Amino acid sequence: MPINRRVQLLNWAYYKPDRYIIEDDYDSEFRYIGKPIPSLQGLDHKGRVIYIGSFSKSLSPSLRISYMVLPAQLVEDYQRKMSFTICSAPAVEQEILSRFIENGFYDSHLNRMRKIYRQKRETLVAAIQKMLPNAVIIGANAGLHLILKVNNGMEGDRLVETAKEKRVLIYDISRFFCDAPPANYRDAVALGFATLKENEIIPAIALLNEAWFHA
């Protein structure tokens, strides 16, 4: 989200005293082009952002530890109303993660993984540009997936179906909207690359080319 849009959202929250923004800073650790964009919580100076995150993407899906940073004025209410909740994350895992972060290993891990994901991302973008020339890539500067507008006359569900016939798993972005996606995104799909081996990317895009343009 561009910085000017983030400021607009904060101004919306500041307009009335009971407005809060819940920010899930998903994939923020992995940015490949340009300087990192500050989180809403980092820009907030009036305590209107509830910041949440997890380590399932940056470390391991099996590490079921998440966190929440509350504005100071909400801490007392949270402790009073949510004191009955039980943390399901084992204490041993929490302690290990705490030491992992404190000793600088988490930052080193992120730097290493950022290089790996950047290379995968560059391979994916190059393959798309070569083999899917009509497609438009959106959101490839950060994260572990990108959005692809295919521009072949098919809508998202059909794109997913034909890709599946070639044994390539992609996602119709309509699943990420509460209502129907905007008309100009009905031919868009999400492609993830985090779990792919680099040598699997080019063959996968070649299969999508067959499915979408040579069926």
Image: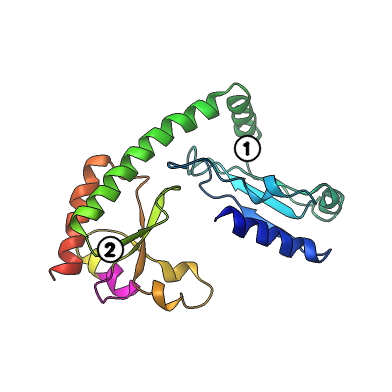
- Identify the residue at horizontal 18%, vertical 50% (top origin): 203
Q: Residue furthest front?
A: 4
Above or below for 38 versus 59: below
- Identify the residue at horizontal 20%, vertical 48% (top origin): 202
Q: Which residues are magenta?
A: 151-161
Q: Residue furthest top?
A: 103
Quadrant that contains the N terminus: bottom right
Q: Earlier in the sequence, mark 1 or mark 2?
A: 1
Quadrant that contains the C terminus: bottom left
Q: Which residue is mark 1?
A: 90
Name the quadrant containing residue 102.
top right
Contact between labelled residues 2 and 1, with CB atoms less than 8 Å apart: no
Q: Residues within 10 Å of mark 2 (few under 14, many from 20)?
A: some
Identified by mark 2, the residue type is Ala
- Identify the residue at horizontal 26%, vertical 41% (top origin): 198
Q: Position of residue 7 (x, y in %)?
A: 66, 56
Identified by mark 1, the residue type is Pro
Which is in the foreground here, disc 1 or disc 2?
A: 2
Element under disc 1: loop
Q: How is the image coloured?
A: rainbow
- Identify the residue at horizontal 58%, vertical 26% (top origin): 100
Element under disc 2: loop
Q: Position of residue 75 (x, y in %)?
A: 82, 48
Above or below for 100 versus 132: above
Above or below for 75 versus 163: above
Q: Position of residue 76 (x, y in %)?
A: 87, 49
Q: Which residue is mark 2?
A: 135
Q: Nearer the viewer, residue 81 or 146?
A: 146
Magenta span includes 12: no
Q: Nearer the viewer, residue 10 or 90?
A: 10
Q: Residues within 10 Å of mark 1 (few under 14, many from 20)?
A: few
